[in-house]
Image (spheres, rainbow, N blue to C red):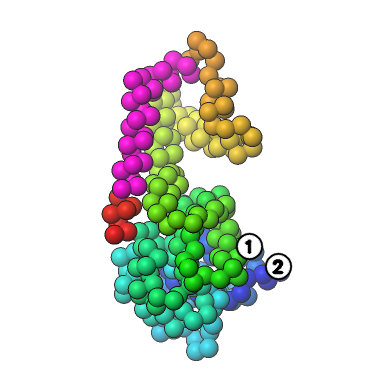
């Protein structure tokens, strides 16, 4: 495999950190140092990947081009200052929910090059979407590197306003949970109508998977695809009429996204 990525420092090898690492491995890596104290983190080691338990274990002279911050937000104040020594040349890419550019800069230095990003869990199968915003000290070269690193797990979009990451968190960050809830509800509804448990689960899961694949393959928007499935006077039309009665379901979903957006803003303050 052709090596295409420069030396990287990954702080945190949890679910999202390990998903990023897996994507980078597919693209080719020269050297990745992972800092993670958990006992299971050793399993991340491999060709060109070294795992250490703390910042104290980083070899002298190691100079990453990017430092990816994948620790829990509540650990940031304790963990981040140890990496301020890399602020002079590395771009810091934060996937910590709720931590603003200013909050991160306060821990690393006001002139630190910082990218704040919000990925989602389908990154684990390279089908994620990440929305990112670059701080004022990020150079075009650093932004390009961040784009390459984040794109290793799926699609990436950039925004100019950091405030947009709050609704992004509510929609794409939490979106997989909403889809999984819908799958749960369809499975339970199948059980309520007498379907065998194995069949109800298989149908619910594959319907969501197949519908997502159709959406990805189609040039039509979601509304057009919904209309195509809804025969006038048919069973789907009857079901949708119940879901949309008095706009209860659409309004509830809108309220849910609003609540999640507001909570993201609370966590950022």
Q: Which residue is mark 1?
A: 26
According to the picture, the residue beneath numbered tag 2 turns out to be: 1
At horizontal 41% and vertical 18% (from top left) the residue drawn is 241
Give the residue at x 57% y 26%.
224
Q: In this rendered view, identify the residue nearer to me: 50 or 10.
A: 10
Q: Examine the structure image and report whether residue 255 is included in the region drawn in magenta.
A: yes
Q: Quadrant of the C terminus?
A: bottom left
Residue extending furthest toward the right: 2
Instruction: Find residue 250 and report its horizontal and vertical position in percent.
Output: 38, 29
Residue at position x 52%, y 80% in the image = 89
Between 94 and 184, the one lying in front of the other is 94
Does residue 23 appear anywhere in the picture?
A: no
Relative side of 99 to 159, left or right? left
Circle 1 Cα neighbour tier, 10 Å, few/some/many (<14 / 14–19 / ≥20): few
Q: Residue reaching furthest top?
A: 233
Q: CA distance from mark 2 to mark 1?
A: 8 Å
Is 156 rendered above or below residue 54?
above
Q: Helix, strand or loop at disc 1? A: helix
Which residue corresponds to the image point at 47% horizontal and 32% vertical from the top-left?
204
Task: Determine the image quadrant of residue 231.
Answer: top right
Estimate the x, y position of residue 168 in percent, counting from the top left. Answer: 43, 49
Q: In the rendering, which numbered label is found on residue 147?
A: none
Q: Residues within 10 Å of mark 2 (few under 14, many from 20)?
A: few
The magenta-colored residue range is 236-262
Q: Are marks 2 and 1 in contact (CB under 8 Å)?
A: yes
Q: Is residue 156 magenta?
A: no
């Amino acid at each position: 495999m052709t090596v295409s990525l420069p030396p990287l420092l990954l702080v945190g090898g949890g679910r999202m950190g390990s998903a990023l690492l897996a994507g980078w491995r597919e693209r080719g890596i020269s050297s990745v140092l992972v800092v993670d104290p958990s006992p299971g983190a050793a399993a991340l080691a491999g060709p060109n990947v070294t795992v250490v338990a703390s910042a104290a274990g980083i070899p002298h002279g190691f100079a990453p081009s990017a430092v990816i911050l994948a620790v829990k937000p509540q650990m940031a104040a304790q963990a981040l200052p140890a990496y301020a020594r890399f602020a002079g040349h590395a771009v810091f890419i934060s996937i910590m929910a709720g931590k603003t550019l200013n909050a991160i800069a306060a821990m690393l230095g006001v002139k630190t090059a910082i990218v704040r990003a919000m990925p989602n869990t389908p990154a684990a199968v390279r089908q994620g979407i990440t929305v990112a915003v670059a701080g004022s000290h990020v150079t075009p070269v650093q932004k390009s590197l961040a784009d390459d690193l984040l794109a290793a797990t799926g699609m990436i979009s950039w925004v100019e306003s950091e405030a947009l990451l709050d609704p992004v968190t509510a929609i794409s960050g939490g979106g997989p949970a909403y889809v999984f809830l819908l799958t749960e509800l369809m499975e339970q509804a199948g059980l309520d109508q007498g379907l065998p448990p194995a069949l109800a689960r298989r149908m619910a899961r594959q319907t969501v998977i197949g519908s997502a694949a159709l959406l990805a393959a189609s040039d039509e928007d979601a509304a057009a695809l919904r209309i195509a499935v809804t025969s006038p006077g048919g069973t789907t039309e009857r079901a949708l009429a119940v879901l949309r009665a008095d706009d209860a379901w659409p309004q509830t979903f809108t309220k849910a996204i609003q609540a999640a957006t507001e909570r993201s803003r609370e966590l950022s303050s």
